Image (cartoon, grey):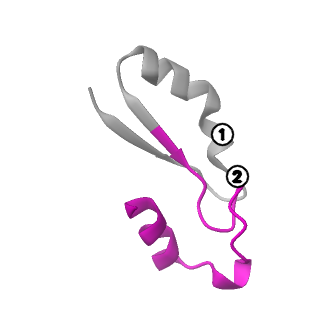
Amino acid sequence: MADIVLIHGAWAGSWVWDSLQNGLRDAGHRPHAVDLPGNGSDATPLTEVSLQRYVDHVAR
């Protein structure tokens, strides 16, 4: 089926998608939940966080 990129909102991390990912897998999709720089388990210092860094991170 489809690769689905799940991007969390402010003050969150990839964990917000935990309950949804199993349902997506069961439906045949491949979910990819990311931790944006400076959020979740990503330890990027907040002084290095920018919108461009978010874009680059998700594009990888």
Q: How far apart are marks 2 and 1 (CA)?
A: 7 Å
Q: In the picture, which quadrant includes the C terminus?
A: bottom left
Residue at numbered disc 1: 16
Instruction: Identify the residue at horizontal 46%, vertical 78% (top origin).
Output: 52
Q: Decide: marks 2, 1 in contact (CB < 8 A)?
A: yes
Q: Is residue 33 above or below residue 60?
A: above
Residue at numbered disc 2: 12
Q: Residues within 10 Å of mark 2 (few under 14, many from 20)?
A: some
Rendered image quadrant of residue 3: top left
Residue 21 in the image: x percent, y percent?
53, 28
Left or right of 34: which side holds 40? right
Amino acid on which disc 2 is placed: Ala
Q: What stretch is highlighted in magenta?
A: 32-60
SS for dot 1: helix
Residue toward you, 9 or 47? 47
Label number found at residue 27: none
Residue 46 in the image: x percent, y percent?
72, 78
SS for dot 2: loop
Q: How crowded is mark 1: few (under 14 residues within 10 Å), some or many (20 or more)?
A: some
Instruction: Identify the residue at horizontal 73%, vertical 67% (top origin).
Output: 43
Residue toward you, 42 or 24? 42
